[in-house]
Image (tube, rainbow, N blue to C red):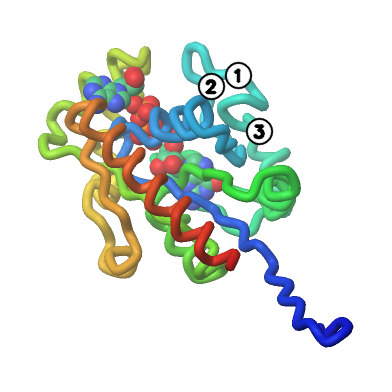
Amino acid sequence: MIEEGHIVMAKKKRNELWIITGAAGTGKNTVSEYLYTQYGIPRVLTHTTRPPRAGEKDGVSYYFETPESFAQKHLIEQVTYDGHQYGSSREALQKAWATHRIVSLVLDTEGAKSYIRTFGDHIFLLFITVHHPDSLRQRMIDRGDAPVAVEARLHSPEYRRDLKLPAELAPVAHIIHNDTWVEAKQEIDRLLKQEAIRMAAEEF
Ligand SMILES: Nc1nc2c(ncn2[C@@H]2O[C@H](COP(=O)(O)OP(=O)(O)O)[C@@H](O)[C@H]2O)c(=O)[nH]1
Ligand SMILES: Nc1ncnc2c1ncn2[C@@H]1O[C@H](COP(=O)(O)OP(=O)(O)O)[C@@H](O)[C@H]1O
């Protein structure tokens, strides 16, 4: 746009979606919670037919659905994970982006692939992993998961699949090793600083 001899450059700020993926127990929700408490980055809630765990509340952890109510949602992608359905809606994302430029979303690796294909360069991808997956059983037990649910989860094909970063995600993934929270937190802080600088430069 040209005004009175001056060139006015109006650049639209780009929204970002921080996708947090990885196997069960690696710390996806812990990272999402940290992004919110430390940086005010809210999480986009998704829908599931999985029963709530101890301490989980509808509308806070997930929107807990019956198979019938789940079928009525308008979801942009959905997966079956360990026998339960999970899905995310465009409405929830747009609502979160209406008030926050950066938001987070916790997904399995299949969901992460769908989002990369749909939202391309709006995505900032975190893959959470640990060097010793044997420790994840105890983390899930300590979290309060029922032992039978933990065993089902550990034997599910989706859990085993998500221990490894898929080749399709590797070029864009930022890998966070969460063997210790101190180490993971440092890496997240570093990435946020780096991304804030990049976003600020983009606005010039
Ligand atoms: N694709 C997809 N995955 C989801 C969605 N909501 C949750 N998930 C993933 O489903 C998997 C199982 O979630 P959950 O039962 O909460 O187990 P957790 O990984 O032990 O916390 C995790 O990898 C979640 O990130 C969704 O809407 N879409
Ligand atoms: N670095 C860590 N060391 C030990 N326990 C952890 C660490 N990070 C997270 N946890 C705990 O492990 C459990 C699983 O973490 P969570 O964030 O729920 O994983 P996910 O969302 O990937 O299933 C939680 O009880 C969490 O407090």
Can you identify the residue that label 1 sits on?
Answer: 57
Element type at mark 3: loop
Left of 170 or right of it: where is 71?
right
Q: Residues within 10 Å of mark 2 (few under 14, many from 20)?
A: some
Q: Are marks 2 and 1 in contact (CB under 8 Å)?
A: yes
C-alpha separation, residue under disc 2 versus residue under disc 1:
7 Å
Left of 190 or right of it: where is 123?
right
As shown in the figure, which amino acid type bears the numbered disc 1?
A: Lys
Element type at mark 2: loop
Look at discs 2 and 1 and give the one toward the viewer: 1
Element type at mark 1: loop
Tag on residue 52? 2
C-alpha separation, residue under disc 1 versus residue under disc 3:
15 Å
Q: Is residue 57 above or below residue 173?
A: above
Ligand 2 shows up in the quarter that is top left
* Comes first in the chain, label 1 or label 3: 1
Tag on residue 114? none
Q: Name the residue at 42% across, 57% down.
A: 110
Asked if residue 61 can be seen in this view, the reply is yes
Q: Name the residue at 53% across, 57% down.
A: 200
As shown in the figure, which amino acid type bears the numbered disc 3?
A: Thr
Q: Residues within 10 Å of mark 3 (few under 14, many from 20)?
A: some
Q: Is residue 65 above or below residue 18?
A: above
Left of 91 or right of it: where is 48?
left
